[in-house]
Image (cartoon, rainbow, N blue to C red):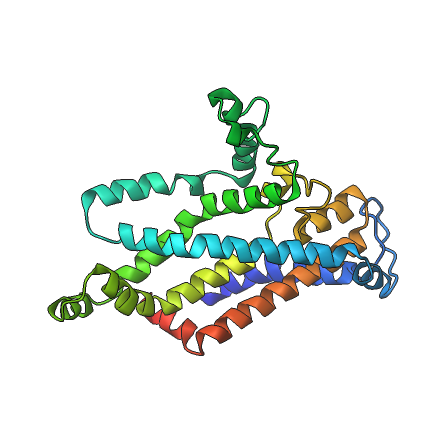
Amino acid sequence: MAWPALVAFTIFGIIPLFGVLVLSFSSWSGLTQDIPFTGLDSWKSVLSDPGLPHALWITFLIMALSWLAQTPLSILIGVFIAAHKRYRGVLAVLFFIPLLLSQAAIAITYKMLLDPNFGLGAGLGWGFLQQDWLGESKLAVGVVIFVVSWQWIPFHSLIYQGGVRQIPTSMYEAAEIDGAGRVRKFFSITLPQLKYTIITSSTLMVVGSLTFFDLIWVLTAGGPGDATRALAVDMYQRGFRSALMGPASVIAVILVLLGLGLALLVRRLGGRDAAESQLEGI
């Protein structure tokens, strides 16, 4: 039964990845049939480019800040909607609506809402919202973090909801007999029992943040200046704006290596049996 999945993964995963690796040793423009191979020239040009450290910094900044914003809220909301009450189920359905929307549509909507002249702030007369949110570096990064969190907190809340419902109710009943309140039960039972769920959610957040492109591109196009030019945006600009498929493929390989390294690091921090415990829970 694993063969169909393995064949599909090979066709749509391994082969394209191998093709990108091959292209990273070329100077192909993407406009010709011939692919001139130039050895390590593309790698040297990318690794010596002073813009690469900045793109790495922006990528890791978005990764860290989005994790800090999403994780606590996702845990709290997941614990809240895990209760078996009718009204919480209705709230959960409404709350997951952002997951049904594309990132491009979300970015267009927020770009219009945050317009200092014709957006929400101007319409309501709120001076605080009439700032140039996408025209100042720090504000633009903050907007990206906010929009990313707004869309993906529901997804991770769903993961934590499932984790909470796997915790034996006998543990809470024993804690109540000992006189523990809600806060004490949360920190002494819920959080420790969610250890491996947090590892799974964090892995998805960290690896997923490496591929943020359409949302950033529609919101800021990597600007103002290069304030939000993450690695995925840099790859697009090199490959499709500058017709440098070789350097763009180098950045793609770097993204894959970063994703694998970060996933292994998070799993290592969570302990050897993180994956096994998640599988047992499922």
**Which residue is found at the position 59% from the left and 23% from the top?**
117
Q: Position of residue 120 (x, y in %)?
A: 50, 26
Q: Is residue 243 visible?
A: yes
**Which residue is found at the position 41% from the left and 73% from the top?**
274
Q: Position of residue 60 (x, y in %)?
A: 61, 58
Q: Position of residue 138 (x, y in %)?
A: 62, 45
Q: Is residue 105 above or below residue 62?
A: above
Q: Is residue 95 above or below residue 120?
A: below
Which quadrant holds the N terminus?
A: bottom left
Q: Is residue 12 above or below residue 119?
A: below
Q: How many marks?
A: 0
**Which residue is found at the position 63% from the left and 64% from the top?**
258
Which quadrant holds the C terminus?
A: bottom left
Task: Answer left or right for 35 relative to 131.
Answer: right
Task: Answer left or right for 155 relative to 166.
Answer: right
Query: Which quarter of the figure has residue 222?
Result: top right
Q: Is residue 267 above or below residue 7?
A: below
Q: Position of residue 177 (x, y in %)?
A: 11, 69
Task: Answer left or right for 165 relative to 153.
Answer: left
Which residue is nearer to you in this view: 115 or 41? Answer: 115
Q: Is residue 19 visible?
A: no
The residue at the far front in this view is 127
Query: Which quarter of the figure has residue 194?
Result: bottom left
Which residue is nearer to you in this view: 59 or 254? Answer: 59
The residue at the far bottom in this view is 272
Query: Which quarter of the figure has residue 262?
Result: bottom right
